[in-house]
């Protein structure tokens, strides 16, 4: 299905706006730019309309909201002649269906500004048509990139979900692109705003490896290796400005001894930062893998599926 990502909720005026440009449009709440928060929505476009979907939703290239273009009057844009101006794709929005694990209910059409806004809070938000948005018509249900149900979502929830260090998912779970060459093992990778999680079932059916930024450092967590446990873990990582990892023989390596707590089913390691620190290292990219060992040198389960994180 044709779809476009980068649609976000504006925390100031509660509309859905397009966040794919450096310019963030025009917000009626304070006449500044829209301010994104929450999930990353992904909207279907240029597909046939169905009984539970509505066409004629368009991007306004003046104020950046998604508005319904089915009426003669294109009210109410906060910019210029007060008429929205349609550009780009023809979006087709699902409505009056159940919310699923990867879709959000409570999105409504506003009869005053004709934009799509989130009506799930007691306050409906500031409207370009004056005062507050006013809901009418269908109950829209918007698809977004959600944490993959199972071990990946469990790990994400464990960190606090949307408000935790990982933040919102920025894509669907899938194979880990360039890093796939390192392992024939099955696995699943998902990127988040400030990190990533990989599910790596050959090292434990609920085994995940997570990387995330916290307090200016990159942290790697892994577990649970149950039903297996180890005396120590080896962590290997690649850190470069390239989106491609280094050749495997040039990755760095650390032995993470489990000390008094062994044998262990989990571990954590703070990865060295790029020169200058995480905060000034946009574009640097980590790859990391973990392997459990016993003191007699046995490593029966091998390296995990690789996790990748690009600092943004
Ligand atoms: Zn806004
Ligand atoms: Zn507009
Ligand atoms: Zn409105």
Image (tube, grey):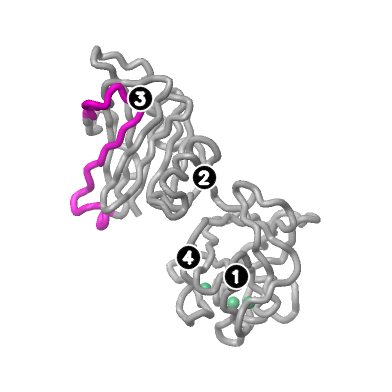
Give the Cα distance between marks 4 and 1: 19 Å
Mark 4 and mark 3 lie on one chain; the one further toward the N terminus is 4
**Would residue 185 be seen by someone viewing this image from the given angle?**
no
The residue stretch that appears in magenta: 255-281
Q: Quadrant of ligand 3?
A: bottom right
* Gap in angstroms between the C-alphas marked 2 and 1: 27 Å
Q: Which residue is mark 1?
A: 122
Q: Is mark 2 within 8 Å of ligand 1?
A: no
Quadrant for residue 286, please give it. Answer: top left
Label 3 C-beta lies within 8 Å of the nearest ligand 1 atom: no
Residues at marks 4 and 3, CA–CA distance in whole angstroms:
38 Å
Task: Determine which residue is flagged by label 2.
Answer: 147
Q: Position of residue 298 (x, y in %)?
A: 29, 14
Q: Which residue is mark 3?
A: 303
Residue 299 visible in the current orientation:
yes
Q: Percent position (x, y) of residue 289?
A: 33, 31
Whether the residues at callouts 4 and 1 have beta carbons within 8 Å, the answer is no
Mark 4 and mark 2: span between their CA atoms?
19 Å
């Amino acid at each position: 299905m044709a779809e476009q990502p980068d649609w976000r909720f504006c925390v100031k005026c509660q509309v859905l706006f397009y966040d794919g440009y450096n310019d963030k449009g025009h917000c009626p709440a304070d006449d500044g730019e829209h301010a994104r928060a929450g999930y990353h929505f992904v909207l279907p476009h240029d597909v046939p309309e169905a009984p539970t979907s509505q066409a004629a939703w368009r991007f306004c290239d003046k104020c950046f909201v998604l508005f319904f273009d089915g009426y003669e009057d294109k009210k109410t844009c906060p910019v210029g002649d007060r008429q929205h101006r349609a550009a780009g794709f023809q979006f087709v929005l699902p409505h009056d269906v159940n919310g699923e694990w990867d879709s959000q209910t409570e999105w409504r059409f506003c009869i005053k500004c004709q934009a799509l806004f989130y009506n799930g809070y007691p306050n409906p938000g500031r409207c370009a048509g004056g005062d507050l948005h006013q809901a009418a018509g269908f109950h829209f249900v918007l698809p977004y990139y959600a944490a993959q149900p199972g071990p990946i979502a469990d790990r994400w929830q464990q960190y606090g979900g949307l408000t935790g260090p990982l933040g919102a998912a920025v894509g669907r779970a899938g194979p880990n692109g360039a890093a796939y060459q390192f392992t024939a093992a099955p696995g699943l990778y998902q990127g988040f705003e400030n990190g990533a999680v990989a599910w790596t079932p050959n090292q434990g059916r609920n085994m995940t490896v997570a990387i995330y930024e916290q307090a200016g450092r990159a942290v790697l967590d892994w577990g649970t290796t149950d039903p297996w446990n180890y005396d120590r873990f080896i962590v290997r990582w690649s850190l470069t400005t390239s989106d491609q990892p280094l050749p495997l023989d040039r990755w760095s390596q650390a032995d993470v001894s489990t000390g008094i707590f062994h044998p262990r089913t989990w571990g954590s390691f703070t990865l060295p930062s790029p020169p200058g620190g995480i905060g000034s290292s946009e574009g640097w990219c980590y790859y990391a893998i973990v392997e459990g060992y016993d003191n007699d040198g046995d490593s029966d389960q091998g390296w995990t599926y690789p996790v990748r994180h690009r600092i943004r």
